[in-house]
Amino acid sequence: MGKIKVTQVRSKIKRPESQKRTLEALGLKGIGQVVEHDATPNILGMVKKVEHLVSVEEA
């Protein structure tokens, strides 16, 4: 199981509440913030839900 780096690149303003909660669950609180997670199916599903707000790269 690899690691991924998730970076928030767009604002969560004017987004549905579920997308805001997903960003918070990933640990992202603002544009430019980077978090590192294991590439589990749960995390990858969360990233897929907000893929238009984040960028992802392998760590």
Image: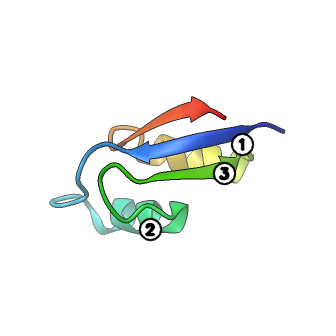
User: The disc labelled 1 sits on which kind of residue?
Assistant: Ala
Query: Which image quarter: residue 13?
Result: bottom left
CA distance separating discs 3 and 1: 6 Å
Residue at the spot 29% in from the left edge and 52% down from the top edge: 31
Q: Which residue is mark 3?
A: 37
Chain-order first, disc 3 or disc 2: 2
Residue 42 coordinates in the image, percent (x, y):
68, 53
* Type of the residue with mark 2: Glu
Q: Report the residue marked by disc 2.
A: 24
Residue in view at x 57 percent, y 41 percent = 5
User: In the rendered image, which quarter is residue 23 located in?
Assistant: bottom left
| Whether label 3 touches label 1, CB < 8 Å | yes
How many discs appear? 3
* Quadrant housing residue 54: top left
Q: Is residue 13 left or right of residue 2?
A: left
Element under disc 3: strand
Q: Secondary structure at mark 1?
A: loop
Other residues around mark 1 within 10 Å, as few (<14) / some (14–19) / many (≥20): some
